Image (cartoon, helix red, strand yellow):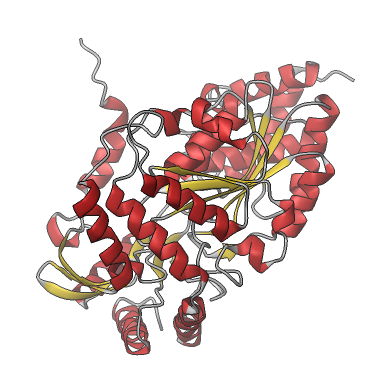
């Protein structure tokens, strides 16, 4: 079954929650660096939990392009659709 | 308005400016004089060095000094050239022969630093169609080697062979024929924990992946002849590439990679961090060669691990939150707040003990550490002094109850 980007975004919000130490309300524009105050290692840890949830490979190479939670949802959608 | 290229560093500058200037700043230490592998004068004060990665105390070994002096006199201060042009002297060849003998390997290549060895090997071996699969807690040089190359980079949970297996399985389902390089470290330098190489390498081999082990912090320290953790665990046959450094146990600077792959020497032509830099100076080459010969036949690692166990046990008994186990030459206590860690470091310096203040992102899991790397050259008296000061400062600033 193909998931919509919104469904993926909602799941990613859930998976991001353990890293949301400042209890920020997450929307698609929420940034990892400024809003969630995550360093690059924490972002990689978060991606690992997304990888395991969807059983996909998320290469670290795309990390520089992932500034917001919404961008991650779009990236996962395109990996799942491949 | 002209874009300020430095704008992106504003928060770093802000954070750094909040630290005190001068001798209380943990990132601007300067040694006035070095007395021995374990002592220096810092800010006019005699200081025990407990954070210098000088595991074997080789920096002042008499035979290494003599070899370096002789090479300096006979071959000059530097080679002024690349290994593939004018920068290969007999000494460089001899060092590579010594490494082949040390590792009982067919091929050895010497780099100008350990950082460049990882950069060069990882970026060159894995091309655009290949994968590099790295441990989450990898050293910056491994991450940078990945960033420099064109391969797809995948990260697995630290020291977790099941997690590695799962990630390799995903890659293979998608890409059955891709080349895969799995990169691990023998010892992880921040908390001094060892890789379970057998389990990790077995998972890699199951998926037809190559295995690279970085023994930077384990050469000299582990294994019957000091080759590292793979030798200690009896699994060298599972390792395709061993990378290491001369800047810790070997007591100078430089890096290397050894392998039995029949085509390995082609790297001398295609590995840019090998080709496009000057080779190591003759004195460095000579002391590294001598140190490797000494390390192979020494029992210094026994003394080193005794020293580490003594400090680790002492810290545990005193009630510290110790992040290390004493199985490697690292001893680190975990401090909750970064401000407290900085204050701790400052007090230790004022008490004549240099340790490393290690903070994220150099540390795993966001930890603030007071980190020691022990040396075989430390006396028990020095270890006990370090411990005494750890306890005294810990009580003073409320880390110890």
Q: Give how far across and how far down residue A78 sits, in percent.
A: 72, 16
Q: Give how far across and how far down residue B205 sits, in percent.
A: 80, 45
> In the drawing, does residue B399 fall left or right of residue A48?
left
Which residue is drawn at the image coordinates 50% and 41% (left, top)? B118
Q: Give how far across and how far down residue A55 sits, in percent.
A: 80, 34
Answer whether residue A31 is visible to the viewer in this image: no
Which residue is drawn at the image coordinates 29% and 81% (left, top)? B396
Is the N terminus of chain A in the top left, top right, bottom left or bottom right quadrant?
Answer: top right
| Residue ranking furthest to the top | B1
Decide which of B89, B121 is in the foreground and name it: B89
> In the drawing, does residue B107 fall left or right of residue B386?
right
Is residue A2 depicted above or below B146 in this figure?
above
Which residue is drawn at the image coordinates 40% and 64% (left, top)? B291
- How many numbered callouts? 0
Asked where in the image residue B345 lies, by quadrant, the reply is bottom left
Answer whether residue B300 is visible to the viewer in this image: yes
Decide which of B307, B398 is in the foreground and name it: B307
Q: Give how far across and how far down residue B318 sits, in percent.
A: 45, 86
Is residue B124 depicted above or below B290 in this figure?
above
Is the C terminus of chain A in the top left, top right, bottom left or bottom right quadrant?
Answer: top right
| Residue ranking furthest to the left | B44
Decide which of B125, B261 is in the foreground and name it: B261
Decide which of B239, B400 is in the foreground and name it: B239
Is residue A57 depicted above or below B18 in this figure?
above
């Amino acid at each position: 079954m193909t998931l919509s980007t919104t469904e993926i975004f909602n799941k990613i919000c859930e998976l991001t929650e353990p890293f949301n130490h400042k209890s920020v309300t997450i929307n698609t524009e929420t940034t990892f660096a400024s809003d969630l105050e995550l360093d690059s290692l924490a972002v990689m840890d978060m991606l690992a939990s997304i990888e395991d949830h969807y059983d996909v490979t998320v290469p670290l190479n795309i990390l520089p392009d992932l500034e917001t939670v919404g961008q991650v949802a779009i990236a996962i959608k395109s990996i799942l659709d491949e | 308005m002209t874009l300020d290229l430095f704008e992106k560093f504003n928060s770093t500058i802000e954070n750094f400016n909040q630290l005190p200037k001068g001798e209380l700043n943990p990132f601007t230490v300067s040694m006035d004089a070095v007395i021995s592998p374990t002592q220096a004068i810092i800010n006019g004060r005699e200081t025990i060095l407990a954070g210098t990665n000088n595991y074997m105390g080789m920096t002042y070994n008499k035979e290494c000094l003599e070899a370096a002096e002789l090479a300096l006199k006979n071959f000059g201060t530097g080679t002024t050239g690349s290994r593939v042009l004018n920068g290969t002297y007999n000494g460089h060849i001899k060092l590579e022969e010594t490494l082949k003998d040390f590792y009982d390997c067919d091929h050895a290549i010497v780099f100008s630093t350990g950082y460049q060895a990882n950069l060069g090997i990882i970026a060159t071996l894995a091309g655009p169609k290949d994968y590099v699969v790295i441990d989450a807690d990898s050293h910056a040089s491994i991450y940078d080697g990945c960033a420099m190359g064109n391969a797809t980079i995948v990260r697995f949970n630290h020291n977790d062979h099941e997690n590695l297996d799962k990630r390799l399985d995903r890659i293979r389902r998608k890409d059955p024929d891709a080349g895969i390089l799995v990169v691990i470290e023998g010892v992880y330098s921040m908390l001094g924990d060892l890789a379970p190489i057998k389990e990790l390498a077995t998972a890699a081999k199951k998926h037809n992946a190559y295995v690279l082990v970085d023994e930077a912090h384990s050469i000299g320290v582990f294994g019957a002849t000091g080759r590292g953790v793979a030798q200690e665990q009896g699994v060298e046959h599972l390792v395709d590439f061993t990378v290491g450094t001369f800047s810790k146990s070997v007591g100078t600077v430089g890096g290397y990679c050894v392998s039995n792959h029949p085509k390995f020497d082609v790297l001398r032509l295609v590995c840019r961090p090998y080709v496009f830099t000057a080779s190591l100076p003759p004195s460095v080459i000579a002391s590294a060669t001598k140190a490797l010969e000494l390390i192979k036949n020494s029992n210094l690692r026994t003394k080193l691990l005794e020293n580490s166990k003594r400090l680790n046990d002492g810290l545990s008994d005193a009630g510290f939150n110790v992040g290390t186990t004493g199985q490697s030459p690292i001893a680190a206590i975990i401090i909750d707040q970064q401000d407290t860690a900085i204050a701790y470091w400052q007090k230790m310096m004022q008490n004549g003990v240099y340790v490393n203040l290690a903070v994220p992102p150099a540390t795993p899991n966001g930890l603030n550490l007071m980190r020691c790397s022990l040396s075989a050259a430390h006396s028990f008296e020095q270890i006990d002094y370090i411990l005494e000061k750890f306890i005294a400062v810990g009580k003073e600033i409320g880390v110890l109850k």
